[in-house]
Amino acid sequence: MKPDWLIVRGSALKEREQVTQLLSDLNLHTVCQEAACPNMVECFGRKTATFMIMGAQCTRSCTFCNVTEGIPSALNTQEPNAVAQAVLKLGLLHVVITSVTRDDLDGGGAQHFA
């Protein structure tokens, strides 16, 4: 028998599906998905998300990280609006915004955060 903290509620799985679908519809990425986080169901179920902006391709290849390394695509200028839209639609209570490393951009893409 599994301890309670290891059991995934069916409702959490449903919430994860809803979050995953909306992120796909809005062309958004989360650290949870890209880094294959084992806690994704729990976080999405608690209406928490860590958005990863500036694409899903990192310009570095850190051995400790599961985020894909490669040549990143151009920045999506609508991404900040899409993040705001996702936060509102999902009724998220806690949001973290981080990014892949973009050594190809001036200032590492800091302007995209602004």
Image (cartoon, rainbow, N blue to C red):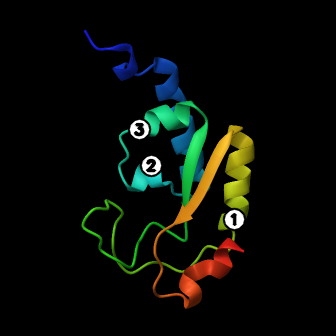
Disc 1: CA contacts within 10 A as few (<14), some (14-19) or many (>=20)? some
Against 87, residue 63 (above or below) is below
Residue topped by disc 2 = 32
- Element class at badge 1: helix
Expressed as whole percent of the image width and height from the top left, the position of residue 44 reads: 53, 37
2 or 75: nearer the viewer: 2
Residue topped by disc 1 = 80
Residue topped by disc 3 = 39
Mark 1 or mark 3, whichever is nearer to me? 3
Expressed as whole percent of the image width and height from the top left, the position of residue 58 reads: 40, 73
- Element class at badge 2: helix
Q: Residue at x 44, y 78 (%)?
A: 72
Expressed as whole percent of the image width and height from the top left, the position of residue 33 reads: 43, 50
Q: Nearer the N terminus, badge 1 or badge 3?
A: 3
Disc 3: CA contacts within 10 A as few (<14), some (14-19) or many (>=20)? few
74 or 52: nearer the viewer: 52
Amino acid carrying label 3: it is Asn
Expressed as whole percent of the image width and height from the top left, the position of residue 78 reads: 69, 69
Disc 2: CA contacts within 10 A as few (<14), some (14-19) or many (>=20)? some
Point out the image quarter for the C terminus: bottom right
Q: Contact (CB < 8 A) between labels 2 and 3?
A: yes
Report the Cα–Cα distance between label 2 and label 3: 8 Å
Q: Which mark is residue 47?
A: none
Q: Quadrant of residue 69?
A: bottom left
